[in-house]
Image (cartoon, rainbow, N blue to C red):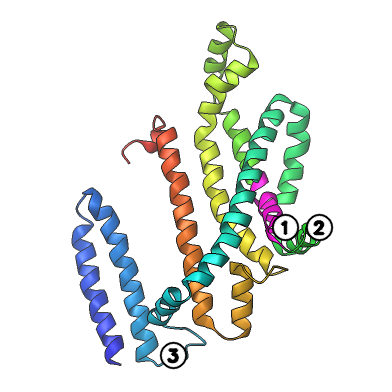
Amino acid sequence: MSWFYGSLLFWAVAWAVNAQLSKRSERWVRFFVPTLFGITVLVIWEGMVRGFNINPVLLPAPSAIGSTLVGEIPTLWTDLVQTFFKGALSGYIIGCGAAVLVAIAVDRSPFLQRGLLPVGNFVAALPIVGMAPILVMWFGFDWHSKAAVVVVMVFFPMLVNTVQGLQASDALQRDLMNTYAANYRQSLLKLRLPAAMPFMFNGLKICTTLALIGAIVAEFFGSPIKGMGFRISTEVGRLALDMVWSEIAVAAIVGSAFYGAVALAEKMVTFWHPSQRGQ
């Protein structure tokens, strides 16, 4: 139980430090406070597992997960390349790119706007566990079927956000473009797409998480002998929960980094928007 009480003491000290630092506004504090909070969670987790002697099949300690992370780097890297770079990232690029092009067509055509968007809402509500095995049968067991699942998952959220963004410019701005005799292409490039950027980046950030989740879930329904979803389903059957948690940790780190990269790009592109002021 000494581990458990030690972790509680660490939590109390970290709480007091965070309470003092939260009153300060320096940039380094914004990074240090959540880092200290995360370390505290890991310490309490370690203390509970060791203090209450919890079966590692039920909940492995962070130290065991970290040891597996270090020892299985080649396997984890192979799984990451298969799932993220081949399946999730390719499907993300294809799905979001296609959604932007279709959104421009929808914006120009009231018929498509009235007909396609309701269908899109219907397709977006379809359960991924129902679509994944069908797409695996269509596109095979390699990463192509996972990319197809990701395309289905990210296409309509991105489409809806982009269509909404293209309508964000107000009537005064559009009238001004008409006064300058701007055609649709000029109005699109100079006014409507820049005004749509905050909405588009909102869709891109939503799709970062959907892409990785979709690729991992799709691998449960058929995959070669590599991939994060394949490894999770296999190691659960072998009761190797430390490897399962290692894959989960890698997915969380990569997903957070992917989201952060898109958020950083948003800050650089939409620096003029009120939502970016004061950040």
Crowd tier of the residue under label 1, counting other residues whose Cα lies within 10 Å: few below 14, some 14–19, many 20 or above? many
Query: Label 3's element?
Result: loop
- Residue 80 placement: quadrant: bottom right
Tell me, yes or no, if residue 165 can be seen here.
yes
What residue did someone put label 2 on? 138
Would you say 93 lies left or right of 24 here? right
- Identify the mark at residue 39; answer none if there is no mark: none
Report the magenta residues as a range: 142-155
What residue did someone put label 3 on? 54
Q: Residue furthest front?
A: 74
Does 154 appear in magenta?
yes
Q: Position of residue 75 (x, y in %)?
A: 53, 71
Q: Nearer the viewer, residue 3 or 16?
A: 3
Mark sitting earlier along the chain (3/1)? 3
Query: Label 1's element?
Result: helix
Does 140 appear in magenta?
no
- Identify the mark at residue 145; answer none if there is no mark: 1
Asked whether the beta carbons under mark 1 and mark 2 sit within 8 Å of each other, the answer is yes
Q: Position of residue 238 (x, y in %)?
A: 60, 86
